[in-house]
Amino acid sequence: MKQQSVSPRRGRTSSANGQQEEVAHLRAELAAAHARIAELDAQLAASVRQTRLVNERLNTILTVSAALLITHEIDTVMQVVVREAVHLFPDTSGALLFLVDQAGMRLRLAASSSGQTGVPVLRPGQGPAGRAFLSPRAMLIAGPALEEALSELSETQRAQERGALTYWPPSSALLTPLRIEDTRLGALVVYGNQNPHLIHPRDIPFAQALADLTAVAIAEHRQRTRAAALQRDLDQTQSLHAEAQARLSAAQAQLLQSAKLAAVGELAASVAHEINNPLYAARNSLYLVEQDMPPDAPQRHFLTIAQNELGRIARIITRMRDFYRPARDELELTEVNDLLAETIELVQTHLRHGHVTVTASFCPNLPLLVAHPDQLRQVFLNLMLNACDAMPNGGQLHISTELSCRNERDEQWVVVAVRDTGVGINPEHMPHLFEPFYTTKPQGTGLGLAISAHIVTQHGGHIQVESTPGVGSTFTVLLPVDRGVEEA
């Protein structure tokens, strides 16, 4: 068998070519690895930028949420929203927030990133804001669609929106409705600048989240405002109800008072009829006694007093049926101090038996009153007797008069005060003192103060009462002064 021989030089050439091919292959793989690393670095950098952008937008959403929790001023909330919307979407031309009126017919610019408010006013469906208002969710428009929406605005409206933006015309816009379920509140519009690709479809969820937060804040503010208005209406209604109830109670009390006074009038007519006959018999008997009595008899003074008082009783009985309507021809000029002095003399015996000491301080220059003297004497007598009854163990009775001005018109009043040091009046009895038939005395009729108050009222005055249990009471009668009589 014959062997073939290989040349050493040819073998070395073949080996060198193999190594070169292997080196070239390794270099190709290394270049591919560098390219892959560069691609991964680019993807990582993009992912980092995207993550940073998402974090920034989440932080913006959190900032807006915190602002909504801190403040309830809706204007402040809306201004925060448009300001953060510009930060949320970089390279924007501006953000505009519109609110719809109560009728749902007009959209008013409520806040803008430039601070402009009030204008423009749009109708639903008009322009980008009107389309956003009617849109079910957020959407991104650009190019011809945005140009068509802007063309729907009038020249004035476009000029107003141009003044609220930093770049015009915008190349893109995020349109977001402000709504809570089926209730439409307004619209949020974020305009881009000259680059239409800076606002991306992935920005739509963030715009919707911002709009939803804003809608919640606006709805909560409106609910709070509505609740405050309802509370005010409720308070006003309750106040009116309380006032009406008070008037009704006063009317019922007045009706009851009128009914009682009507009963008093009917009783007075009956009593007057029954008393007249024995009264005239007593007066006639006194007249006969007077005829047989010597002129210088010491008893004649007391007989005169008895005749005068019986005459006064006769006049009172005659007028009992209409005591609350004194006739004008029965009124006369009356000196109050003289009436009080006469009344004190009448009760002197009663005061001595009750161990009551009486003092008086009368104003010396009181004007004359146009009054019914017998009726006023009846009032003063009743007040003095009540004061004596309030001091079963004795005490002090003080009668005073003064002239006073009690209102802004400088009207003058004669003031008569009857003050005792008796047991006083319990607070629960105070509202009923002048009601007919109301009495705390075992044998009382409950007519004295009611008749007295009515007489004073018909004279144009009124009675005031101050009392402290265990200390005493003061009844004050105020009677108006007729300026014409005073000057005469």
Image: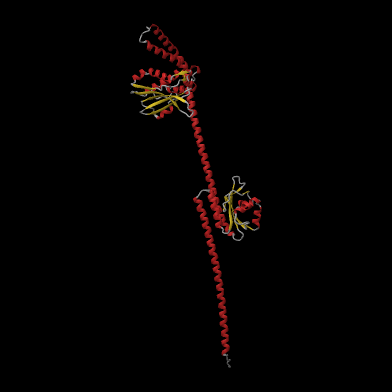
Q: Residue furthest front?
A: 487
Q: Is residue 149 above or below residue 367?
A: below
Frontmost residue, 393 versus 36: 393
Residue 225 in view (yes/no): yes
**Quadrant for the N terminus in the image:** bottom right
Residue 183 in view (yes/no): no
Relative side of 314 to 9, left or right: left
Q: Is residue 483 above or below residue 297?
A: below
**Which residue is depicted at the point 40% across and 30% down?**
427
Image coords of residue 33 (percent x, y): 55, 73
The part of the image, by quadrant, that contains residue 9 is bottom right
Frontmost residue, 342 versus 147: 342
Image coords of residue 451 (percent x, y): 45, 22
The part of the image, by quadrant, that contains residue 476 is top left
- Colouring chosen for the image of the structure: secondary structure
Image coords of residue 106 (percent x, y): 61, 47
Q: Count the marks: how many?
A: 0
Q: Is residue 245 above or below residue 229?
A: above
**Which residue is depicted at the point 56% across and 77% down?**
27
Q: Residue furthest bottom?
A: 2
Relative side of 22 to 357, left or right: right
Image coords of residue 327 (percent x, y): 50, 18
